[in-house]
Image (tube, rainbow, N blue to C red):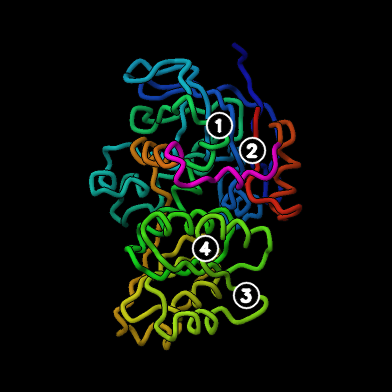
């Protein structure tokens, strides 16, 4: 086995480059996974642009599909050579956050408080998946075996965007018969639309302007699409709902305008489920928040991870109830990762998700 591997490395703001790194060593509770397919996330673009800080020299990426190359001496229940998916979030299973049922916020607290989103390690605090090999910590809590009948590309949505999008509907408390609005139909928003449909929403209003994304939203469950470039989405949604408002608004873009619009379209006691990654302070308008007296709920979410979450996502894929195969629009080799970033970061050529294969 070689001693080095190719990896996409954050060098400085504006530069992620392909270079050589040592193949990771593993501890007794780790696994070494040979990556067969991975992808680029919108969060990786935030890192590239310097909007989310990570250490120089870090391997980026948090959506791994691959084959177990080596298991630590303490790992049981898995075999070398087994095909697996690993969630973008890798909880330890034993931290205070995990034992409180919130593994995405894994990590030790300090006397000054807990560190948020500590469960997100790949491409954040440890080397990530845009490489030939990946060290998976706490492997027994995070490896999930892939059924033979499912392809790598079908699984590729599970680690992050599928789990995140679905969690937008779950955390929003979508119920049978609900009216749900989803702001932005990028990969996360499309998965939120699909998740709301699965959970029983009977009227889903998608807010989007790109024709290809509008078409995909309709395929995944949107009943109505509002083009925000053609009309004010708040006015349109209030008209569509006869002034009632929506039960749940899911914000999947991460900007002030969509966050605020989500608040303004809620019915009394409605829920704003926020999935966006925000890069500046948010303001809550007094009237939209009803001076704090409107029984409004605002929920935030970090992609749920761990092997049980991945098992559930795999079950959805295997059942055929949601088909996300159309989200992979472009394919690159790892050697072309810099070109893939250029395409994805600039949202050219109708890109939704890219498949990266070493």
The vertical placement of 279 against 132, above or below, is below
Q: Is residue 319 magenta?
A: yes
Quadrant location, the C terminus:
top right
The vertical placement of 120 against 224, above or below, is above
First to last magenta residue range: 317-331
For marks 4 and 1, the one nearer the N-term is: 1
The residue under label 2 is: 355
Quadrant location, the N terminus:
top right
Closer to the camera in the image, 136 or 287: 287
The residue under label 3 is: 228
The percent coordinates of residue 41 (x first, y second) are 58, 48
The residue under label 4 is: 222
Q: CA distance from mark 4 to mark 3?
A: 15 Å
Q: CA distance from mark 2 to mark 4?
A: 25 Å
SS state under label 2: strand
Q: Is residue 325 left or right of residue 178?
A: right
Q: Is residue 28 left or right of residue 131?
A: left
Closer to the camera in the image, 176 or 281: 176
The residue under label 1 is: 152
């Amino acid at each position: 086995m070689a001693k080095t591997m190719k990896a996409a490395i954050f060098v400085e703001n504006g530069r992620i480059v392909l270079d050589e790194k040592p193949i990771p060593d593993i501890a007794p509770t780790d696994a070494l996974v040979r990556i067969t397919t991975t992808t680029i996330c919108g969060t990786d673009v935030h890192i590239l642009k310097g909007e989310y800080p990570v250490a120089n020299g870090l391997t980026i990426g948090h959506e791994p599909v691959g084959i177990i190359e080596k298991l630590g001496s303490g790992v049981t229940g898995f075999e070398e050579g087994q095909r697996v998916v690993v969630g973008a979030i890798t909880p330890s299973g034993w931290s205070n956050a995990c034992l409180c049922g919130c593994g995405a916020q894994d990590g030790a607290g300090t006397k000054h408080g807990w560190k948020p989103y500590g469960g997100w390690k790949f491409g954040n605090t440890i080397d990530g998946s845009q490489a030939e090999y990946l060290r998976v910590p706490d492997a027994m809590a995070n490896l999930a075996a892939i059924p033979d009948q499912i392809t790598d590309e079908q699984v590729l949505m599970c680690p992050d965007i599928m789990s995140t999008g679905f969690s937008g509907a779950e955390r929003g408390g979508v119920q049978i018969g609900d009216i749900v609005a989803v702001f932005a139909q990028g990969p996360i928003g499309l998965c939120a639309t699909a998740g709301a449909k699965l959970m029983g929403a009977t009227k889903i209003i998608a807010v989007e302007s790109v024709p290809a994304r509008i078409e995909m939203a309709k395929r995944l469950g949107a009943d109505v699409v509002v083009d925000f470039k053609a009309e004010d989405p708040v006015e349109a949604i209030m008209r569509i709902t006869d002034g009632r408002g929506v039960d749940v608004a899911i914000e999947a873009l991460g900007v002030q305008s969509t966050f605020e619009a989500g608040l303004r379209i809620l019915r009394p006691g409605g829920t704003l489920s926020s999935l966006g990654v925000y890069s500046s302070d948010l303001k809550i308008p007094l009237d939209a928040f009803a001076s704090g007296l409107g029984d409004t709920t605002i929920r935030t979410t970090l992609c749920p991870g761990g092997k049980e979450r991945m098992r559930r996502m795999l079950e959805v894929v295997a059942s055929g109830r949601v088909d996300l195969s159309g989200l992979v629009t472009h394919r690159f080799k790892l050697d072309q990762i810099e070109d893939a970033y250029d395409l994805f970061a600039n949202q050219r050529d109708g890109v939704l998700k890219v498949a990266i294969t070493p």
